Image: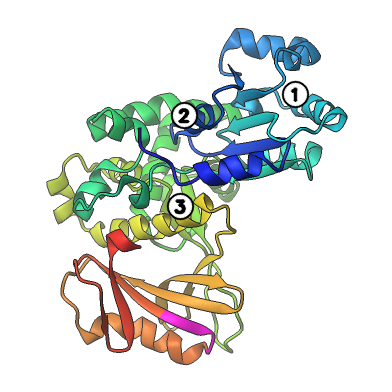
Amino acid sequence: MIRRTIESKLLSLAGQYPVITVTGPRQSGKTTVSTKCFPEHLYLSLEDPDVREHARKDPRGFLAQAERMIIDEVQHVPDLVSYIQRVVDRNAGAGRFILTGSHQFSLTDIVSQSLAGRTALISLLPFSLEELREKSSYEHLIYRGFYPAIIDRNLNPTEALSFYTDTYIQRDLRDIREIRNLRQFESFLRLCASNVGQMLNKTRMANDIGIDGKTVDAWISVLEASYIIYLLPPHYKNFRKRIVKMPKLYFCDVGLASYLLGISTIEHVKSHPLKGMLFENLVVVEKLKRKLNNVEPPSLYFFRDNTGNEVDLLEQDGTDVVSYEIKTTQTLNSSLFKGLNFYKKLNPDNKRSVLIYAGREKTDRYGHECLPFWRV
């Protein structure tokens, strides 16, 4: 079994807080890591209709079944969280309840209201490069993605992601918000994939699909809440320049984006016109995983002004900023560093500048670090 980076943080926080709340997309490994770290806890899943009915009808009796419990997909019975609050207020032993859920915003709202100060919040995305410790080609990683089931069982990514889309995404999203036209929603999902690595232009997307702006807002919100997409915000520091204000759109798993683009082989990746954007998606989300696995605020941004000067990724640490340019090339030349050079002159807080590329050599060029993507 592949060890998850977050395990040590999970165990540490469970020694400090009575409740741990783990959110993340379907099949990211929330249940596996929770049961591995807390084998003595009673495990109950609210996906089971009988278990869910028990929790709804008799929450006190449900929680009295064991002193320590893992409750999976707790958002199915939101009122249960209020009863958990009363239990831990009477006996606030550390690590009593491990709650998991696949709906980021709804679950966070529920626990924030009822369990403020009583719970630690953890987000778990699919496997990271750090966890896999592999140096496969980026084309293979883009095609396959990082969902644990695909990797653990060596599944065909196209088939597995097709089933994932049908059985999890559509079902979950219909649970969160009524979606009447599934065919139109599937077209919207594929449109999101075709905009990977680009700024989110909701007006254009609405026109492309033939829906209104409110529907686009609702569908983007639900995809973000379910950890299907990740919106990277622009950096708003005042440089006396007009800075774009739209976020950039990425998928929390690059393999899912590839599937939605119709990629079904590694060869398709190599020739695809969005290969560079998919590579950028891979790198940006690896940085996001690194932050989340260490239970740190993401603090990730991008920079672009109205004249087209751009840096793919900014990582802020206090006042210091690290800038990243992301390229699929294996050959280094001065033109690759144009954005990094511009931003370095613009922002005195830019302490490091890094080119992440598809080569194998870690080096320094033209005053910047150069890192192979698997060292991100």
Left or right, 326 with reference to 333: right
Residue at which label 2 appears: 32
Front residue of 343/240: it is 343
Q: Amino acid at mark 3?
A: Lys
Disc 1, SS = helix
The C terminus - image quarter: bottom left
Give the class, few, some or many, for how many residues have Cα within 10 Å of label 2's Cα (few <14, many ≥20): few
Q: Is residue 116 visible?
A: yes
Pinpoint residue 133: horizontal percent, then vertical percent.
29, 49
Give the class, few, some or many, for how many residues have Cα within 10 Å of label 3's Cα (few <14, many ≥20): many
Residue at which label 3 appears: 289
Which residue is depicted at the point 37% across and 55% down?
196
Q: Is residue 218 visible?
A: no
Q: Amino acid at mark 2?
A: Thr
Residue at which label 1 appears: 80
Query: Magenta segment range?
Result: 348-352
Q: Is residue 345 above or below residue 41?
A: below
Disc 3, SS = helix
